[in-house]
Image (cartoon, rainbow, N blue to C red):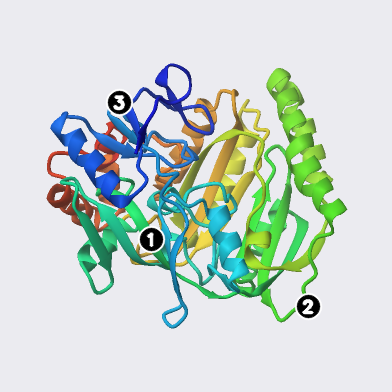
Amino acid sequence: MSTTASEKNGTWRNWAGNVTALPAREVTPASVDELSAAVRKAAEDGLTVKAVGTGHSFTAAAATDGVLIRPQLLTGIRKIDRTAMTVTVEAGTPLKRLNMALAREGLSLTNMGDIMEQTVSGATSTGTHGTGRDSASIAAQIKGLELVTADGSVLACSETENPEIFASARIGIGALGIITAITFAVEPVFLLAAREEPMTFDKVTADFEELFTENEHFEFYWFPHTGNCNTKRNNRSAGPENPMGPIRGWIEDEFLSNGAFQVANLLGRAVPAAIPSIAGFSSRALSSRTYTDIPYKVFTSPRRVRFVEMEYAVPREALVETLRELKSMVDNSTLRVSFPVEVRTAPADDITLSTASGRESAYIAVHMFRGTPYQAYFTAAERIFTAHEGRPHWGKVHTRDAEYFSKVYPRFGEFTALRDRLDPDRRFANDYLRRVLGS
């Protein structure tokens, strides 16, 4: 087990650079036993403990001034069970490595988000999701969890073992313990036919129900200051495989979506008045395309332009009205927004603090280029989202607190009671959890 300092002078920093922390010490356990020992030692020293993945959260969910656990040695597949169709994977495994390893075994997750850098435990603990009419978040595909609790003991939970813990721990925001392994449901690898094409804002909002109903996975991006959107439809296909050509893939995914987009954002940050013109150009730069490939090559894409993000889940039936209010707010303001607004959906699930818990949901994500003031835009957007009983993503910027969550999550008290039971001394607490869950 190694103990090291983060970065220079021991400061830990998240991917977007908007959150920093100065832990007392940092531990990289090489086994579950070493992790348990680190938690017990922290208790002896009167220190809190937080595990951190790749820092892709925009909130301070993983920040600590106590012991920072780095799980990068707790990686890899423990077991593939082809009878039960499950895979058990160590908590520090990056989603990218899991996806590639499963594909080599002829297997796949059913649905996933579009960023694949996160660790499996970080992604699931904050409720990371893709888009789906029938298939839900990554956490909803969990069949079993193993976690180290506040006294250093190792606890297993599933639908049949400690089911009341399983109901909450799949999206636990790091409040119930440190996850050491996750068992996911998997299925034989399949093909997805992807269809991407521009569409006007008016058309996509007018036809939203139809587009949602007719496609297994539908999402779209609206470019602020324009009436333009880019839509994505992903549906299962019998084949044949028809992957994106390497040259076109590079031009659109690397040059336009990352390289040229980075330059456009740097220009917009330097000259905000140019942003509406840049947005008009950006929204027309991507043309229609279709391709067919295995899931992770369709669902996930590189994200090299750094940003800060807020995302709220609203009831699906409130999506169009909420989005129109957001567009009207931007159109009638002096805001200059260079990043597209992303819209996705999820079916209702049964996880206590899932943003889709008990209700069909639609997600609206607003972004700002890193280093650009985002507070005015996010504050105005949040006012609209909360008016529709929005639930913020646990890993993305928001200002809500426990009082608000107790109103929008019917089972909020169930989660906090479980936390009282599993972590009465708040070994896993930090400022963020005190705000969102209460002290």
Query: Which of the two residues, 394 or 278, is positioned nearer the viewer here?
Result: 394
On the image, numbered disc 3 is attached to which residue?
Answer: 65
- Which residue sits at x=54%, y=27%? 374
The reply to whether residue 329 is visible in this rendering is: no
- Residue type at mark 3: give it: Asp
Q: Is residue 54 left or right of residue 68?
A: right
- Which residue sits at x=13%, y=39%? 425
- Residue type at mark 1: give it: Ile
- Residue type at mark 2: give it: Pro
- Percent position (x, y) of residue 269? 68, 22
- Percent position (x, y) of residue 358? 35, 65
> Dot 1 lies on which element?
strand
Circle 3 packing at 10 Å, graded few (<14), some (14-19), many (20+), is some
- Percent position (x, y) of residue 127? 42, 53
Along the polypeptide, which appears first: circle 2 or circle 1? 1
- Which residue sits at x=25%, y=39%? 38
Query: Which of the two residues, 385 or 268, is positioned nearer the viewer here?
Result: 268
Q: Is residue 89 above or below residue 50?
A: below
Instruction: Name the disc covering residue 240, or none.
Output: 2
Q: Check if mark 2's residue and mark 1's residue have beta carbons within 8 Å.
A: no
Q: Check if mark 1's residue and mark 3's residue have beta carbons within 8 Å.
A: no
- Percent position (x, y) of residue 356? 41, 60
Mark 2 and mark 1: span between their CA atoms? 33 Å
Mark 2 and mark 3: span between their CA atoms? 53 Å
Along the polypeptide, which appears first: circle 1 or circle 3? 3
Circle 1 packing at 10 Å, graded few (<14), some (14-19), many (20+), is many
Q: Is residue 161 above or below residue 91?
A: below
On the image, numbered disc 1 is attached to which residue?
Answer: 182
- Which residue sits at x=28%, y=58%? 168
